[in-house]
């Protein structure tokens, strides 16, 4: 569930819905998507088609449907033209060429949002964090020893510790390695930054004031709340999750409660609704009450940071207030469609935003499904408020389920119940937290008293989350991407069709029970996921590496690399039931191999974290050593010749050689830790990101490289020699790679070479998590990407 709007009305479903703006909203959204993915020429073509269609509608103006066609066509043409106008300078930006070459750029930028810790960041987003992301606007770039004025949106990947205190509106100078933006959007470039910001200007007065308020709330929360709750209240009130513990994050993800700490229309609806109720209680004139609510909304936007996501939530919150004031479903749907048109036209990048899609889907469900469902319950004697509380989370989860499964590959069976249990305490906790935010900077005792009043509500939410995740099969693994989305869409449509027919309730209940049993059976039956008897698993962590080697002890495994996302590697290990990691190996200091560190460390017993001996200074810049020590694990160095053994696993280190001179930055890949493991399915060669030089070194070292399973170097990069692949001569090649990545991985030539050697090739971008295990006729694989056909 992505949004918690209050837009639940009592209107009878007998009244016809006003759908006139819905085709226009869908048309604008679809045209914007096509333009962003296909380029400005396509956007211009769509705009011309819209103009032509509008002209045709004007010719047929006497037809009843002509006016709607003209309006829809004009809106689509306008939105498409706007996309083209924005895309052309991005696609022809002078920084595109140095970005394609991966050059280092020195730029001056103005921040358009606060730094957000990545999934690999620590609880405080600062000292323990690893990396953060933020969006900024380019002001100038330094080239040829001169500063040149420029413009455009840029995404910065920065050290969380030194950038965490920056605010929206500040200007900084920095240097970073240019990376090509992935997917659709309006980004000129992505900069990977590894140093603190320079020449930092003061934040705007409004942002300084807002940060003082947020700081007061954080201080009051730290003074009177438990460690688990102190980071929850700022997240609940203003979306500030910098103090949220990783364990709480994980519980919320599995319990379907993550939306509570995301700024949504519900936050604004609760705050503005409380202001309206206060002014109505003192019999203030409607104009004064509305003005006060509007001022509260504007103040909340500034307080929450003013980022695009907050502005989107402000519009959705205004929609919730409109629905609350009008109490009419017929008016709310056109308002929702109008919001989509305005937001997508204003900020086209929202068209590809998962958060925006989830928000719209949830709000649509609350507008269309919740009213008739709550009315049906009310007619059967249930109080209206209780009926609304029951149907709101169910309707929202039903609508957002396809998107959630497509993004995460998981479906929460406890999400509806968990949201139902916490819903009554969210509004009072939010109101008390908001009041504490306003008062704590000026009167710390009063702020702490208000925060203390919210403590029982917060502890209840944490208790519900802990109980929810302890339920067996709290989340069900499903295929991610289009396969999983299609499966859930089919189920959702079946539910809606069954609800449409009189007497379909028993059939609905039986169908849902059958589907639940089917999916649960898929999740636990032998040959399903997790498969029994697996020896090696390549986790699907996007564009990165994370390999898991079974030790022969239940719940224990050696992990090699963590990928770029803590959430993804944590989910993979959870699905495998891994609770103890005697050794975590980080092959080299690139973020796609170590940034998900927290996903392994948090909630598990990790004995040691190992890195190679040839890049100690580069590891010092990543914060891995600090995070390892803080979580009670040992930090060790690996070099060629070392051996380790467990009941069903033996590992030998083949590279790097003993400590020596530091490799140049461009050769860090060749300093990767290379392991050769003996497992029940045979020998496994894990190669990190070694390229041609590192491969030649292994070939000349005299080490045995032959292996039944090869983790293909560097995500299948073309910088892999045929000689090296022949020396390994694998039966199975695992390629850990991100879907539709910008690096051209994996190379078609490398895949053909492997197949020419007789190897089966399995890719995580197509298969999801891939397990290697013993079969009746030898080694076989199973994957989450095809749960109905676990064998390959």
Image (spheres, rainbow, N blue to C red):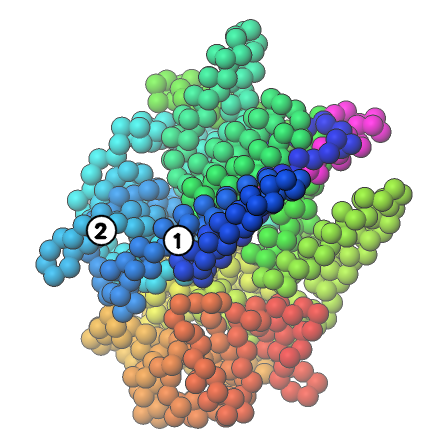
Q: Position of residue 287 (x, y in %)?
A: 50, 13
Circle 1 SS class:
helix
Disc number for residue 84:
1
Circle 2 SS class:
loop
Image quadrant where residue 636 sits: bottom left
Q: Is residue 678 above or below residue 334?
A: below
- In the rendered structure, the answer to whether residue 351 lies left or right of residue 416 reads left
Q: Residues within 10 Å of mark 2 (few under 14, many from 20)?
A: some
Span shown in magenta: 360-384
Q: Is residue 103 above or below residue 692?
A: above
Q: Position of residue 130 (x, y in %)?
A: 35, 54
Which image quarter holds the N terminus?
top right
Please identify the dominant SS of the magenta region.
helix
| Whole-number angstrom distance, CA of label 1 to CA of label 2 | 19 Å
Image quadrant where residue 779 sits: bottom right
At 37% from the left edge and 54% from the top edge, which residue is drawn?
A: 87
At 55% from the left edge and 75% from the top edge, which residue is drawn?
A: 536
Foreground pick, 249 / 790: 790
Residue 607 appears in the figure: no
Disc number for residue 747:
none
Disc number for residue 150:
2
At 62% from the left edge and 67% from the top edge, which residue is drawn?
A: 784
Foreground pick, 453 / 482: 482
Q: Is residue 404 above or below residue 98?
A: above
């Amino acid at each position: 569930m992505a949004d918690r709007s209050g837009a639940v009305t009592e209107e009878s479903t007998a009244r016809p819905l006003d759908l006139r703006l819905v085709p226009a909203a869908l048309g604008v959204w679809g045209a914007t998507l096509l333009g962003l993915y296909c380029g400005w020429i396509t956007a211009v073509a769509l705009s011309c088609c819209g103009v032509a269609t509008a002209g045709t509608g004007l010719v047929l103006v006497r037809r009843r449907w002509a006016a709607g066609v003209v309006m829809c066509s004009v809106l689509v043409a306008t939105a498409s033209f706007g996309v083209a106008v924005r895309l052309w300078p991005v696609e022809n930006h002078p920084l595109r060429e140095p970005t394609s070459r991966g050059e280092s750029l020195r730029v001056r930028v103005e921040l358009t949002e606060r730094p957000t810790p990545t999934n690999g960041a620590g609880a405080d987003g600062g000292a323990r964090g690893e990396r953060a992301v933020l969006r900024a606007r380019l002001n100038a770039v330094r080239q040829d020893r001169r500063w040149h004025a420029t413009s455009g949106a840029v995404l910065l990947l920065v050290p969380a510790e030194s950038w965490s205190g920056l605010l929206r509106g500040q200007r900084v100078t920095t240097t970073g390695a240019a990376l090509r933006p992935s997917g659709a959007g309006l980004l000129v470039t992505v900069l990977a930054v590894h140093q603190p910001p320079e020449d930092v200007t003061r934040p705007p007065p409004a942002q300084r004031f807002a940060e003082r308020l947020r700081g007061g709330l954080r201080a009051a929360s730290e003074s009177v709340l438990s460690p688990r709750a102190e980071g929850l209240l700022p997240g609940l009130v203003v979306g500030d999750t910098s103090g949220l513990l990783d364990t709480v994050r994980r519980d919320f993800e599995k319990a379907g409660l993550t939306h509570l700490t995301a700024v949504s229309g519900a936050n604004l609806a609760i705050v503005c609704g409380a202001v309206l109720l206060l002014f109505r209680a003192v019999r203030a004139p409607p104009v004064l009450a509305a003005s006060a609510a509007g001022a509260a909304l504007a103040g909340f936007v500034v307080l929450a940071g003013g980022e695009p996501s907050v502005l989107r939530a402000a519009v959705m919150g205004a929609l919730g207030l409109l629905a609350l004031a009008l109490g009419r479903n017929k008016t709310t749907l056109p308002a929702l469609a109008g919001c989509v048109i305005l937001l997508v036209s204003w900020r086209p990048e929202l068209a590809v935003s998962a958060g925006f899609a989830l928000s719209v889907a949830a709000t649509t469900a609350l507008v269309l499904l919740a009213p008739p469902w709550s009315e049906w319950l009310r007619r059967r004697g249930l109080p209206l408020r209780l009926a609304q509380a029951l149907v709101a989370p169910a309707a929202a989860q039903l609508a957002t389920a396809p998107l959630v499964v497509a993004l995460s590959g998981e479906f929460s069976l406890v999400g509806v119940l968990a949201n139902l249990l916490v819903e009554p305490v969210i509004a009072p906790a939010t109101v008390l937290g908001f009041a504490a935010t306003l008062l704590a900077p000026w009167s710390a005792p009063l702020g702490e008293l208000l925060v203390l009043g919210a403590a029982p509500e917060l502890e209840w939410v944490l208790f519900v989350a802990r109980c929810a995740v302890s339920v067996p099969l709290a989340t069900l693994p499903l295929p991610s991407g289009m396969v999983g989305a299609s499966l859930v869409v089919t189920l959702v449509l079946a539910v809606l069709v069954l609800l449409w027919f009189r007497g379909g309730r028993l059939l609905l209940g039986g169908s849902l029970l059958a589907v639940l049993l089917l999916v649960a059976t898929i999740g636990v039956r032998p040959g399903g996921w997790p498969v029994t008897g697996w020896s090696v698993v390549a986790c699907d962590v996007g564009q990165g590496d994370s390999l898991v080697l079974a030790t022969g002890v239940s719940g224990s495994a050696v992990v090699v690399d963590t990928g770029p996302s803590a959430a993804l590697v944590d989910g993979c290990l959870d699905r495998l039931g891994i609770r103890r990691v005697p050794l975590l190996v980080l092959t080299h200091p690139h973020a796609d191999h170590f940034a998900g560190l927290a996903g392994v460390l948090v909630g598990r017993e990790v004995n040691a974290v190992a890195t190679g001996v040839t890049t100690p200074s580069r590891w010092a810049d990543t914060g891995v050593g600090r995070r390892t020590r803080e979580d009670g694990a040992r930090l060790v160095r690996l070099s060629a010749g070392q051996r380790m053994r467990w009941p069903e696993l033996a590992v030998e280190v083949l590279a790097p050689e003993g400590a020596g001179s530091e490799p140049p930055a461009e050769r860090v890949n060749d300093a990767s830790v290379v392991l050769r493991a003996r497992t029940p399915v045979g020998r496994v060669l894990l190669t990190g990101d070694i390229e041609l030089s590192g491969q030649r070194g292994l070939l000349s070292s005299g080490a045995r490289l032959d292996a039944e399973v090869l983790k293909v170097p560097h995500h299948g990069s073309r910088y892999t020699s045929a000689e090296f692949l022949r020396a390994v001569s694998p039966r199975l090649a695992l390629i850990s790679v991100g879907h539709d990545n910008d690096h051209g991985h994996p190379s078609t030539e490398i895949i053909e070479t492997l197949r020419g050697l007789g190897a089966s090739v399995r890719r995580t971008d197509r298969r999801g998590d891939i397990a290697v295990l013993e079969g009746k006729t030898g080694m076989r694989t199973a994957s989450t990407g095809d749960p109905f056909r676990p064998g390959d």
